[in-house]
Image (cartoon, rainbow, N blue to C red):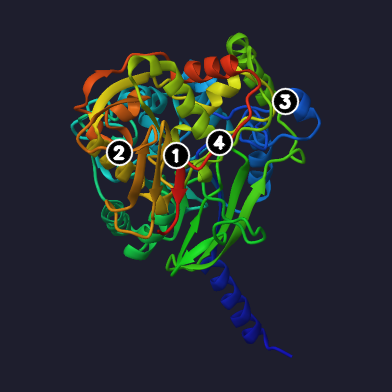
Amino acid sequence: MLTRLALAGVFAAAAGMAQADYVLTILHTNDFHARFEPINKYDSTCGEEDNQAGECFGGSARLATAIAELKAEAVNPILVDGGDQFQGTLFYTYYKGQLAAEMMNRLGYDAMTVGNHEFDDGPEVLRGFMNAVKFPVLMSNADVSGEPLLADVLMKSTVIEREGEKLGLIGLTPQDTDELASPGPNIIFTPPADAVQAEVDKLEEQGVNKIIVLSHSGYRVDLQVAEATTGVDVIVGGHSNTFLANDDASAAGPYPTMVGDTAVVQAYAYGKYLGELVVTFDDAGKVVEASGGPRLMDAGVTEDEGVKARITEAAQPLEEIRNEVVAEAAAPIGGDRVNCRTGECEMGNLVADAMLDRVKGQGIEVAFMNGGGVRASIDAGPITMGEVLTVLPFQNTLSTFRVTGSVLKEALENGVSQFEEGAGRFPQVAGMSFAVDPTKPVGERISDVMVGGAALDPEKLYGVASNNYIRNGGDGYAMFVDAQDAYDFGPDVANVTAEYLAKVGPYTAYTDGRIKVGME
């Protein structure tokens, strides 16, 4: 039998162990893109009839239920977001960031990072959103001191507490946000790993040894940051809409993906999943265990009636626009994110064809669309304006201009320069064809460019249709900024696409080999 003294020693050791281990539950979302209503399997709006039939996913009402239930049972829960709450549906077009702020406050978020789309309408709308939310919005890898709207409010990092333990939170946004969105001229974006390490060092000087990066930078960059920094325990990602899981062959990697002692997680997009990571720290703040996975927000999750009623109320001003049937699809039109950023895709062909058709009588020969501008697929049957606006939510206008063949080639090279990352700059085209070899060095990947059945002439001036975002240098297309005869004030590309669909009758999606991807 153990003596009383020995028993006391056992209890003391157990007590010491209990104090040393600290468990934290991180609930997380990313790339929500104003999907306040449930979505269908194409990541587009799911009607109430289908919702009642159990065929829908996500939506703020389901997230509210799941978050409340998990917070009630989890150990030391926090709720964070990896950026891009803005843009994607009519809700954002109408309310800008205000409905997102209301819902995030209601669901009880503790922090978020700035995504590139938070800058789509400039610093003004982001500042309005930040004024409305009850939690910190973070971004470490930028100098905002020259932007008066953000200089005093947009912090690089913050510290929150759970059960007496300090948690350091650091924000991260794409280094090329100035190309991806409209942050204005006063913000200077900087490399991610350096920015993160600087904040880690500051937090550690304050005695904070549990550090979480909220990163809207993409899965690949997150892995690089984890490798290049010390002191980061968890990276909650976004931007690349990466699905991580341990029991699904379609996942891009395990959940969490461990890089040394750093746990990297992401939860796809659009509120379809709620990420849940349980992390155990020792008394030195080192991660000794990290486990969890994405929870599917399907019909098995009951919708919160109060939140559902509020979203229904918020949707009323949008109904007339959204429910107008503008065309018919003979079959589904694929707008899958991965497909449209790495090769020819059905929705890319549709949008590019529509743009070219609209202005071909003006001497325009080719159309150029960034794959990242395509945001959803459309199912077969009646097509509503709401569906078209979900595919093309950015209110980009049709631009026309003239550039030489050599500039067109340069633009194509830019479009495939980040092929490995699945970047949104990948070009969807009409009136032309090309081949891309992703194994070749950047700047040497494009070949076999044909326009109207003839080889591209480097000296010839070509008429081009695109959107005002690309024409003004978005997604790295700086070569279009000084184009000749530029006109950026055409109709909304969404309206152009809707009118084209109506014109051609029941639309059958197709690909025709205009983009060939592979080694020569």
Is residue 494 visible to us here?
Answer: yes
Residue at numbered disc 3: 305
Looking at the image, which residue is at 30% across and 42% down? 176
For the residues labelled 3 and 1, the Cα–Cα distance comes to 26 Å
Local crowd size for mark 4, using a 10 Å CA cut-off: few (<14), some (14–19), many (≥20): many
Q: Earlier in the sequence, mark 2 or mark 3?
A: 3
The answer to whether mark 2 and mark 3 are in CB contact below 8 A is no
> Mark 3 vs mark 1: which is more N-terminal?
1
Q: Which residue is mark 1?
A: 83
* Mark-to-mark CA distance, 1 and 2: 40 Å
Dot label at residue 346: 4
Between marks 1 and 2 in the image, the one whose residue lies nearer the viewer = 2
Q: Nearer the viewer, residue 165 or 122?
A: 122
Above or below, 141 relative to 132: below
Is 17 in front, or is 473? 473
Q: Nearer the viewer, mark 2 or mark 3?
A: 2
* Between marks 3 and 4 in the image, the one whose residue lies nearer the viewer: 4
Specify the amino acid type for callout 1.
Gly
Q: Nearer the viewer, mark 4 or mark 2?
A: 2
Q: Residue at x 36, y 58 (%)?
A: 225
Please report whichever mark, 1 or 2, sits nearer to the chain's N-terminal start: 1
Instruction: Find the distance from the CA under tag 2 to the CA under tag 3.
Output: 58 Å
In the displayed structure, 355 sits above or below 317; it is below
Circle nearer the viewer, 4 or 1: 4
Disc number for residue 456 = 2
Task: Kindly identify the amino acid type of the residue bearing the numbered disc 3.
Answer: Glu
Quadrant where the N terminus lies?
A: bottom right
In the drawing, does residue 239 fall left or right of residue 402? right
Mark 4 falls on what kind of element?
A: helix
